[in-house]
């Protein structure tokens, strides 16, 4: 069982992700803002992070991604966005993000990513990102 931090200001997305995380026998922890998310990430028991890329209290996408990566400390990070673009996808390359998904996404796809992330936290050497 992993603790999965879900950072998103969209209540429906958080609800759906939290329900899926629970069904997969993991523990969801919710945060609705950058400030809440960063505070929750200070807890080392948060093992997997799923975060929206755009939140109202962030100071720009690049700043948020840099802060997320600094706080994740090699924990699996899945980034989601409601406003996908080629520019955004290009910015995410090379940032060490496990996956970058556009909303709406299939919960089955998240299920597979959570399985990969869980395996990565159990055996980090086998799943180290280049």
Image (spheres, helix red, strand yellow):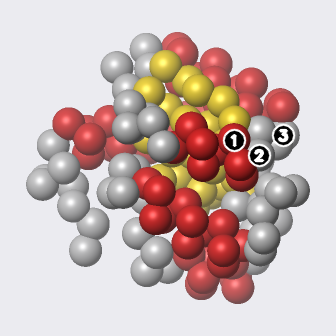
Q: Are marks 2 and 1 in contact (CB under 8 Å)?
A: yes
- The crowd level at tag 1 (other Cα within 10 Å; few <14, some 14-19, many 20+) is some
Q: Is residue 86 above or below residue 45?
A: below
Q: Determine which residue is flagged by label 1.
A: 36
Q: Nearer the viewer, mark 1 or mark 3?
A: 1
The one nearer the camera, 23 or 62, is: 62
Q: Residue at x 54, y 16 (%)?
A: 22
Q: Is residue 56 above or below residue 20?
A: below
Mark sitting earlier along the chain (2/3): 3
| SS at mark 1 in the image | helix
| SS at mark 3 in the image | loop
Q: Position of residue 91 (x, y in %)?
A: 60, 82
- CA gap, disc 1 and disc 3: 14 Å
The one nearer the camera, 54 or 109, is: 54
| SS at mark 2 in the image | loop
Instruction: Residue 74: tell me if it is visible.
Output: yes
Q: Determine which residue is flagged by label 3.
A: 10
Q: What quarter of the picture does the N terminus occupy?
A: top left
- CA gap, disc 2 and disc 3: 10 Å
The quarter of the displayed image where residue 20 is located:
top right
Instruction: Residue 112: tell me if it is visible.
Output: no
The quarter of the displayed image where residue 46 is located:
top left
Q: What quarter of the picture does the C terminus occupy?
A: bottom left
Q: Determine which residue is flagged by label 2.
A: 33
Mark sitting earlier along the chain (1/3): 3
Q: Position of residue 63 (x, y in %)?
A: 66, 74
- The crowd level at tag 3 (other Cα within 10 Å; few <14, some 14-19, many 20+) is few
Q: Residue at x 82, y 42 (%)?
A: 9
Q: Position of residue 80 (x, y in %)?
A: 66, 54
**Res. 92 mark:** none
């Amino acid at each position: 069982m992993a603790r999965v931090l879900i950072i998103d200001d969209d209540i429906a997305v958080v609800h759906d992700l939290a329900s899926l995380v629970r069904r997969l026998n993991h523990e969801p922890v919710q945060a609705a803002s950058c400030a809440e998310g960063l505070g929750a990430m200070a807890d080392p028991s948060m093992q997997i992070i799923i975060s929206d890329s755009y939140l109202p209290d962030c100071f720009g996408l690049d700043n948020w991604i840099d802060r997320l990566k600094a706080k994740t400390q090699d924990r699996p990070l899945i980034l989601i966005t409601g406003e996908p673009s080629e520019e955004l996808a290009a910015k995410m390359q090379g940032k060490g993000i496990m996956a970058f998904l556009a909303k709406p996404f299939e919960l089955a796809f998240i299920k597979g990513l959570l399985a990969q992330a869980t395996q990565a936290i159990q055996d980090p050497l086998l799943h180290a990102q280049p």
